[in-house]
Amino acid sequence: MARRKEENNNHKKELTKDNYKRQSGTRDRIPDIIISCEDTVSTPEYLNLIFETLIKAKKITQDSFIIVPDDVLKGTNPSKVLERLRKYKNSNSKRYKDFQHKWIVIDRDIERVNGGGHTSADFNKAIQSAKNIKQDLNVEVAYSNDSFELWYLLHFDYICTAILRDELNTRLIKNLKEKNPTKFRDLDKKKIKTKEYTKLIYEELLELQPAAIRNAKKLLESYRGSHNPESDNPSTTVYELVELLNKIVLNCISHDKQNVQIFQNNQTINKSYKCTLTNMELYQYEIL
């Protein structure tokens, strides 16, 4: 009896971070993911913020989550984004095909009279090429028609009428200023894609993310079987990538109660999440 009592007392001792370190061979490896983005600032920053919790807590390895740098291959048109992904190779000779998940993030960004935008041919080429590669190497496409900011706007409303980049940004800025006048007082179209404001937007919209996913899914379903990514404005599959990233995060931090405790106590993160997984629906984030 004395031995059992001693064991129980030892079990009650406060655990340290070392107690929570992953034991070799006790868990499946963290899925690794590589992403090539058309945008070189705001989209990569937004995606990095989803993984920030794992990065700060050192729960992922250096090459588990890669945003391909644009110096691998210059160019922002969709076909270049895919080509940049395929050219990636790190110092350990790890290539894009060695990653479990491979994605490109592109915009339809219709050509504008005053310059900018992409041709429909190039956009279609990127999607079709990714599909051809997918037969063997599983490259996925997170696209937005007309731009990535549609994903932000879907956090506020369900939108089913055509809308181009300029109007998207106008409506988004208006909604953000109404939601938080102090934080977004100085936000304008020039600042909306900066790293600073991307972080603020991510944090402000996190609680609305489940609504954005529902709206994005509903939008795609509205096209039924005739959906054409190039011509169907508005539409986006960014939610599919967001769901995947969130699922990876949640699988890591909710695998056991010990990991959750680390994240709740980690002062550098200063956030805790209540996560609910239902069926194969990914999650609901609620800031406690």
Image: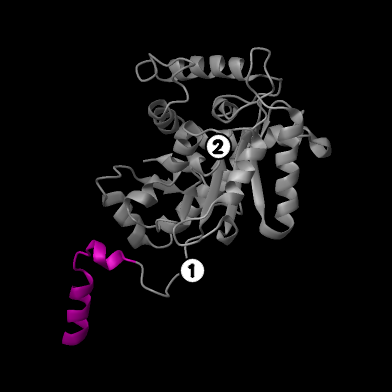
Task: Please name the residue shown 74% across and 49% down the image.
Answer: 131
Residue placed most toward the observer, 75 or 81 = 75
Q: What secondary structure characterizes most of the magenta part?
A: helix
Q: Amino acid at mark 2?
A: Lys
| Crowd rating for badge 2 (residues with CA inside 10 Å; few <14, some 14–19, many 20+) | few
Where is the C terminus found, in terms of image quarters?
A: top left
| Crowd rating for badge 1 (residues with CA inside 10 Å; few <14, some 14–19, many 20+) | few
Q: Nearer the viewer, mark 1 or mark 2?
A: 2
Q: In this picture, is 127 found above or below 6? A: above
Task: Please name the residue shown 78% across and 33% down the image.
Answer: 223
Residue 12 part of the magenta-drawn span: yes
What colouring method underlies this structural image?
Answer: one colour
Q: Amino acid at mark 1?
A: Asp
The image quarter containing residue 95 is bottom right
**Mark linked to residue 74:** 2
Q: In this picture, is 185 found above or below 287? A: above
Q: At which x and y percent is residue 215?
A: 63, 32
Residue 218 part of the magenta-drawn span: no
Horizontal side, residue 110 vs residue 50: left or right: right
Magenta stretch, residue numbers = 1-21
Horizontal side, residue 232 vs residue 259: left or right: right
Task: Please name the residue shown 50% across and 61% down the image.
Answer: 93
Task: Please name the residue shown 51% across and 45% down the image.
Answer: 68
**Mark linked to residue 28:** 1
Q: Are marks 1 and 2 in contact (CB under 8 Å)?
A: no
Res 255 visible: yes
